Amino acid sequence: MNSLTEENYLKALFNIANETGEVNVNELSRRLQIKMPTVTSMMKKLAQKKLVHYESYKPLHLTEKGKKEAGLIIRKHRLTEMFLVDKMKFGWEDVHDIAEQIEHIQSVVFFEKMEELLGYPKVDPHGSPIPDRNGKVVWKDYSKLSDCKVGETVRLSAVINTSSEFLKFLNSREMRLGLKIRIRSIEPFDKSIIVSYGKRQAEVLSNVVCERLLVEKDA
Amino acid sequence: MNSLTEENYLKALFNIANETGEVNVNELSRRLQIKMPTVTSMMKKLAQKKLVHYESYKPLHLTEKGKKEAGLIIRKHRLTEMFLVDKMKFGWEDVHDIAEQIEHIQSVVFFEKMEELLGYPKVDPHGSPIPDRNGKVVWKDYSKLSDCKVGETVRLSAVINTSSEFLKFLNSREMRLGLKIRIRSIEPFDKSIIVSYGKRQAEVLSNVVCERLLVEKDA
DNA sequence: AGATTTTGTTAGACGAATCTAACTTATTAC
DNA sequence: GTAATAAGTTAGATTCGTCTAACAAAATCT
């Protein structure tokens, strides 16, 4: 079994790899708020446990075993978030910190029961896919709203940044998953766009926001 | 804030004091499966934090502060057990180990929400009282079934031992909290008793069992 | 290409929580 | 009331996860 600390390293490795492709010691150090020498030594330990491929000065990679174990932790995290929103009536902006703790609970039945009560959900409240029982996760091929063209109508399917500030911002604009959005115009200077959705006819969204919104072109 | 380890010592101190009155290093050591020297040094640490009254070779006592903090952990434990049974449909024999982990979750809102969803329960699924927001807990004055007399009719209100084996035994006899039990006879030799309840007219219960069943005389 | 900056590693220390071995105090038994 | 046993403490070691200081390698910038 892995320690809580090891689990946090695995999860971070998994998440960074998913976001930015390559993981290095520095990035992991910043993400976990842990100094680089500590990270280096943990990488050696995880390498011994066959969870990470580690070579001095080279980028870090999870092994297949490491990916599986990381995926299973993220599975527990996302199931928990879904449970907190669906069954316990928390807002999507309030679940991260709690899930961050509950993901370390060691009990197979506990998460199986959650999953059952939730009706085997495929995604969490932020649209991120829930890894399967083997830790495997597949992202649908969403586009960033910032990559869409004028005139397109899309459906908001996931948010990349799950910071409570960003989610509160979306709340304040009445934006939630599933929302149908039409792109009315794009300002070339700063790439901000004007969209319409629901009862809102001309909402301005900065590029910073649009890059964090993943959408599906409607079928 | 107290570490997870410290929380476990506090809880054990609280529970042992409640069960047997006095707590000593040896007992705590056995309960926590931690060697005595380790316990001694932890007691010194908790004494520094004003959570425990500690004097060499003397029995151990929680301070008021210690009692409060222990009570709040047990509050979280019992709320969780109630949540697992009521909202997640676990059996009362399956919730202890999960609650043992969730009790350490640091989130005020999480447990407030639980409590609200449960409708502010007063007891957990085993009949133990849930401490209030200040960690204060009051046991009703239940009797042990083993102390009742022939002819009495009582209501099963709590179980002392919450081991899964004992609870499965009760399940197999269709015994649950709230059950009305009539004492038909007591065997003087081994203090086993014969009771009737529900559809069962003459069930034999050993003294070992009866000592672990807390009952209320009906109003 | 050489200098500078960034990134990564090595070495050594530290606190938390645990252990074993040896010793001391308290309790129990005869 | 002493001997034997049980309970408790002290001292010192160990593992885990962290740190800082110093050094080394790689990347970047003229």
Image: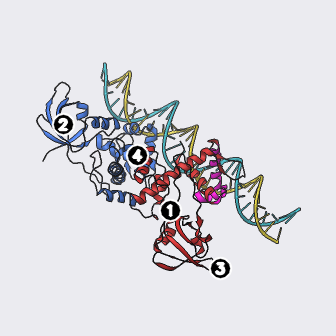
Chain colours: A red, B blue, C cyan, D yellow
Q: CA distance from mark 3 to mark 4?
A: 54 Å
Snapshot quadrant of residue D12: top right
Few, some or many C-alpha atoms within 10 Å of disc 3 (few <14, some 14-19, many ≥20)? few
Q: Find residue A188 and name its label.
A: 3
Residue B138 image position (x, y, % from top left): 25, 51
Q: CA distance from mark 1 to mark 3?
A: 29 Å
The boundaries of the magenta stretch are A20-47
First in sequence, mark 1 or 3: give its number.
Answer: 1
Residue B106 visible within the image: no
Which amino acid type is marked by label 2? Lys
Few, some or many C-alpha atoms within 10 Å of disc 2 (few <14, some 14-19, many ≥20)? few
Few, some or many C-alpha atoms within 10 Å of disc 4 (few <14, some 14-19, many ≥20)? some
Which amino acid type is marked by label 4? Ile
At horizontal 44% and vertical 45% (from top left) the residue drawn is B42
Residue A21 among magenta residues: yes
Local SS, label 2: loop
Question: Contact, CB < 8 Å: mark 2 with mark 3?
Answer: no
First in sequence, mark 2 or 4: give its number.
Answer: 4
Q: Find residue A126 and name its label.
A: 1
Q: CA distance from mark 4 to mark 1?
A: 26 Å
Question: Contact, CB < 8 Å: mark 2 with mark 1?
Answer: no
**Whether marks 2 and 3 lie on the same chain:** no
Snapshot quadrant of residue B163: top left
Q: Find residue B99 and name its label.
A: none
Where is mark 2, residue-wise? Answer: B199
Q: How many marks?
A: 4
Residue A64 among magenta residues: no
Q: CA distance from mark 2 to mark 4?
A: 33 Å
Q: Chain of mark 1?
A: A
Q: Residue furthest left?
A: B151
